[in-house]
């Protein structure tokens, strides 16, 4: 039996001319491994959008737009508050200075007694008192004590000290008997007997500030 073979049959790996096929075989490509740079880029959050310069300037100018009349009104109100608080501040500073003088042992007894008397007089003026220049300290003290009988003993000690400092013979061993507590008692009794208007004037607009 004759064997038939294809005349034009080519060996595997040969082209039609019988030469070896030089075309490289295509192998399946391996997937590329992600690099560290690409991983970093993917992990970073997107950068916030920067507003345009015109938009930023517009927002700033809108926030700073305060009416001129509001600024003027605020300045006037602040000035009025400062002026209203100034008499009270000055009166408190004067009172504290006198109380410090009363407790200052380096001062003479006469100066310490005069400091207590000056504060007593100002308390009287702040609450509507009007002492006369011709009155002696005893007369003024008697008039004040009549309105605040609960503090009459404190008033007596203060006036006794100023009389001794003014008229008695100098005595190195003498010391004033009045204290800051006596002045506090007088102040509390005057405030207790004052009405609302008198309390307000004595606290915020003390008349003694304008007397000296």
Image (tube, rainbow, N blue to C red):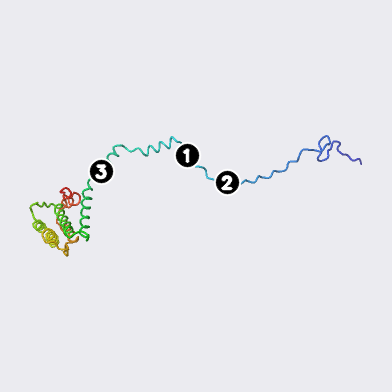
Is 76 or 19 nearer to us in this picture? 76
Is 173 or 12 nearer to us in this picture? 173
Mark on residue 40? Answer: 2
Mark on residue 50? Answer: 1
Pointer 3 local density, CA inside 10 Å: few below 14, some 14–19, many at least 20: few
Q: For the residues marked 2 and 1, what is the alpha-carbon distance in whole angstroms?
A: 22 Å
User: Element under label 3?
Assistant: helix
Q: For the residues marked 1 and 3, what is the alpha-carbon distance in whole angstroms?
A: 43 Å
User: Element under label 2?
Assistant: helix
Pointer 2 local density, CA inside 10 Å: few below 14, some 14–19, many at least 20: few
Q: In the rendered image of this protein, does residue 125 appear above or below residue 103?
A: above
Quadrant where the N terminus sits is top right
Mark on residue 95? Answer: none
For the residues bearing labels 1 and 3, Cβ distance under 8 angstroms = no
Q: Where is residue 187 shown, x and y percent of the image?
A: 17, 57
Judging by the rendered image, the residue that carries numbered circle 3 is 79
Mark 1 vs 3, N-terminal side:
1
Q: Give the left or right position of residue 125, taking residue 23 as reference.
A: left
């Amino acid at each position: 039996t004759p064997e038939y073979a294809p005349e034009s049959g080519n060996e595997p790996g040969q082209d039609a001319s019988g030469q070896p096929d030089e075309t490289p075989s295509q192998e399946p490509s391996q997937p590329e491994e992600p690099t560290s740079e690409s991983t970093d880029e993917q992990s970073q959050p997107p950068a916030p959008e920067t507003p345009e310069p015109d938009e930023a300037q517009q927002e700033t100018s809108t926030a700073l737009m305060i009416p001129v009349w509001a600024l003027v009104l605020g300045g006037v109100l602040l000035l009025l508050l400062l002026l209203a608080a100034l008499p009270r501040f000055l009166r408190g500073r004067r009172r504290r200075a006198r109380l410090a003088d009363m407790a200052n042992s380096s001062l003479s007894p006469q100066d310490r007694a005069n400091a207590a008397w000056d504060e007593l007089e100002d308390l009287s003026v702040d609450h509507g008192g009007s002492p006369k220049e011709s009155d002696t300290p005893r007369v003024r003290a008697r008039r004040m004590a009549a309105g605040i009988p609960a503090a009459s003993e404190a008033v007596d000690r203060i006036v006794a000290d100023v009389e001794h400092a003014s008229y008695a013979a100098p005595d190195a061993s003498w010391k004033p008997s009045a204290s800051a507590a006596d002045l506090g008692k007088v102040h509390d009794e005057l405030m207790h007997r004052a009405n609302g208007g008198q309390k307000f004037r004595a606290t915020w607009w003390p008349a003694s500030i304008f007397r000296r």
